[in-house]
Image: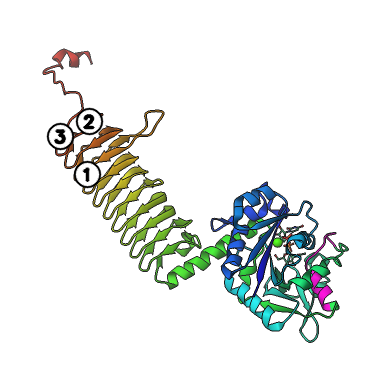
Amino acid sequence: MNIASLILAAGKGTRMKSKLPKVLHKVGGKAMVERVLETVQSIGTNRDVVIVGFGGDAVQNYLGDRAEFVRQEEQNGTGHAVKMAQPVLGDYDGTILLLCGDTPLVTKESLEALLEEHKNSGAAATILTAHMPNPTGYGRIIRNEEGSVVRIVEQKDGKPEELAVQEVNTGMYAFDSQKLWPCLDQLSDDNAQGELYITDVVGILVNGGDKVSAYMTKDFEESLGVNSRLQLAEAEAILKHRKNVELMTAGVTIIDPANTYVAPEVTVGADTILHPGTILEGNTVIGERCEIGPHTRLTNVKVGNDTIIHFTYGHDCEVKDGVDVGPYVHLRPNTVLGNKVHVGNFVEVKNSNVGEGTKFPHLSYIGDSDVGSGVNIGCGTITVNYDGKVKHRTTIGDGAFVGCNSNLVAPVTVGNYSYVGAGSTITKNVPDKALAVGRSKQIVKENWVTDDTFKKK
Ligand code: UD1
Ligand code: CA
């Protein structure tokens, strides 16, 4: 089937009370319109057109070359928005999958079922509907005595008996392209909102003798349209619950699902335990048998197997197998912690490669460094990577032992199996297997305290 998607995203979203266009508000860490676009693209559309208007540049910049864009300068309703796409999709030979940019929860499965129904029924249009326990705000699906769809009535235009209908329009439809365009010329703004409604196309088609079919989603929650901050939080909660269920079904333990936040794209291996306060975002990948949290936020972090990370914030970095991190650790971009590394409390690691079995047990800053394997970094060690203008690298060889409270002033190399005495400020390279001590000599003044010193007190 030839399918082109058309996503309406020009509205201001007045009810959001925001300067940001509504469709750029994020759910599960991604803009709502991006979620809709990615879902339709997963079906295999061959064109994707997004209608932008309010904050159009921002929406276009956000999506980049992932879609084609058409401007709707004045937002005169969803029917008017669709009309704007006629110059680019008017000749399209196939099915137009029409969606709104504010329904981020819709699944690939439901859209595929909608398209399947559309193909099998031979209808001119097929509506994705949902049974909503509380349908307030949505368009209602009006059927005749035989049960066929005859039109859609908007909340603001509905008579009480129409508003009692609980089958709602999700705002998603499959249209036979050649049937859609002629109907748009017949839309009128003679309604409560003074707008051109795309929903009126249904009545126009039926009155013209065409068939309109419907497919009802199994789960009404996925058709939630986000019009307010309250609905944004509802959408977030639904996505979160969906992900938790998916993970637990696949063998992940979640101690407290209400306090665990895993973005839809994240993957977690079996027998991993997620403790309360765990937030896994972006393209984070967690292996098997790990323990994450409590109170840990990982954004775009790749974690191997059998690793423990607690009370930590990590972003854009990699932690391999059997590693133990935390508490109170900051792992910053371009850090790779090798197998069995130990990073203890109050440590920051940035843009560094750390070899197998190396230990940073407490209170260190390791930045722009290449650290070998089996290295022991004493408490309070700092790689002095910045001279005020440029960042420099520090290299620490395999098996090196750096004493507590040392400053390694980069660019500098500490050789393999070498020792740095505690409290040293190292400004010159330390050869392999050497001992370097860079601190002032201790002076001892015997009997410096006299009896008089005490008497004065
Ligand atoms: C719309 C439907 C309603 C359905 C609901 C599902 C109409 C008239 N009503 O109502 O039947 O139940 O969605 O969520 O279609 N937009 C534009 N240009 C405009 C107006 C809107 O691009 O001129 C975009 C908005 O950015 C939004 C989408 O169209 O993404 C829907 O608009 P919205 O105002 O949210 O419609 P609803 O009142 O929710
Ligand atoms: Ca809406």
The residue shown at (72%, 82%) is 122
Q: What is the x, y in percent for residue 135?
A: 71, 70
Quarter of the image where the N terminus is located:
bottom right
Residue highlighted by disc 1: 376
Give neighbour class at mark 2: few <14, some 14-19, many 20+ (Cα, 10 Å): many
Residue highlighted by disc 2: 424
Height in image: 108 above or below 263? below
Q: What is the x, y in percent for residue 165?
A: 75, 75
N-terminal of the two: label 1 or label 2? 1
Judged left or right of residue 32, residue 88 is: right
Q: What is the x, y in percent for residue 82?
A: 76, 62
Query: Please, what secondary structure does the residue beneath circle 1 have?
Result: strand
Amino acid at dot 3 = Leu
Q: Which residues are magenta?
A: 192-206
Q: Give the label, 3 or 1, closer to the camera.
A: 3
Give neighbour class at mark 1: few <14, some 14-19, many 20+ (Cα, 10 Å): many
Quarter of the image where the C terminus is located:
top left
- Gap in Å between the C-alphas at discs 3 and 1? 14 Å
Which of the four quarters of the rendered structure image does ligand 1 lie in?
A: bottom right
The quarter holding residue 119 reads: bottom right
Amino acid at dot 2 = Ser
Disc number placed over residue 435 in the picture, else none: 3
Q: For this rendering, which residue is in front, 85 or 365? A: 85
Height in image: 130 above or below 80? below
- Gap in Å between the C-alphas at discs 2 and 3? 11 Å
